[in-house]
Amino acid sequence: MKVMPPAEVFDVLDFAIGLDWPLSRDEVQKLAAERFGWTIETEDGKNYLVNTVAALTHSDVRTIDVKGQVYSSNFRVTDTTPPPTPESTAFLSDQFALLVREGVRRWGKQTMNHGQDATRASWHVPGDGRVSFSLLERSVSAFFRTPQGVESDRKAAFYGV
């Protein structure tokens, strides 16, 4: 099974944390493509960022924007496994544990959430962003929430949305 090395995952996250937010989707895609050698593909008139370097089966980098500002971005760290086996579950758990261990080293104690579909480790990071790793049944993903996305989450929680 293919996997992004943890050093590569954290290089991407350090890049995102260090950007001068707010930025548009086009700006983020252009900067990431230049920095990492990723590609920007167009489908139905919309640009999509693709991590062609990691050679994962699902290599899209999802970038969510609201009113022209990126609020979040996420990408798979591992390939998607076929239906779970004890071996694939152990492999994914090990990959998740490596990422969490490095996250703790960099940002301190994580917040852990154990849901029905995923286990998620999260940190507030420099610049008012948020990083999370999700251990899913068939893959591991990394997630970055921009300062604008974090602020939107705070407002939504304040207003009970």
Image (cartoon, rainbow, N blue to C red):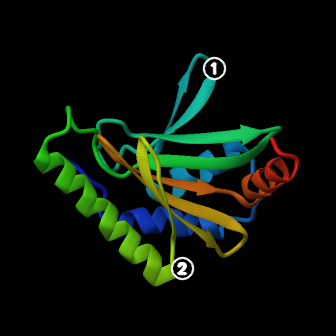
Label 2: few (<14), some (14–19) or many (≥20) C-alpha neighbours in 10 Å: some
Q: Please identify, in this view, whether the residue under mark 1 or under mark 2 is nearer the observer.
A: 2
The image position of residue 104, as x and y in percent, is 45, 78
Question: What amino acid type is highlighted by mark number 1?
Answer: Gly
89 left or right of 12 in image: left
The image position of residue 157, as x and y in percent, is 79, 51
- Residue tagged 1: 45
The image position of residue 60, as x and y in percent, is 45, 38
Q: Classify the position of the C terminus by image quarter.
A: top right
Which structural element holds mark 2?
Answer: helix
58 left or right of 37 in image: left
Instruction: Name the residue located 65 percent from the left edge and 40 percent from the top edge.
Output: 64
Vertical comparison of 151 with 108: above or below:
above
**Extreme residue toward the top, this view:** 44
- Residue tagged 2: 107
Q: CA distance from mark 1 to mark 2?
A: 39 Å
The image position of residue 44, as x and y in percent, is 59, 16
Q: Kindly indicate the quadrant of the structure image that contains residue 25.
A: top right
Q: Nearer the viewer, residue 64 or 152?
A: 152
Pick whichever of labels 1 and 2 is earlier in the sequence: 1
**Circle number at residue 117:** none
Q: Kindly indicate the quadrant of the structure image that contains residue 94.
A: bottom left
Q: Nearer the viewer, residue 83 or 34?
A: 83
Instruction: Name the residue located 41 percent from the left edge and 41 percent from the top edge.
Output: 117
Instruction: Name the residue located 64 percent from the left edge and 49 percent from the top edge.
Output: 72
Instruction: Name the residue located 71 percent from the left edge and 48 percent from the top edge.
Output: 71
Question: What amino acid type is highlighted by mark number 2?
Answer: Trp
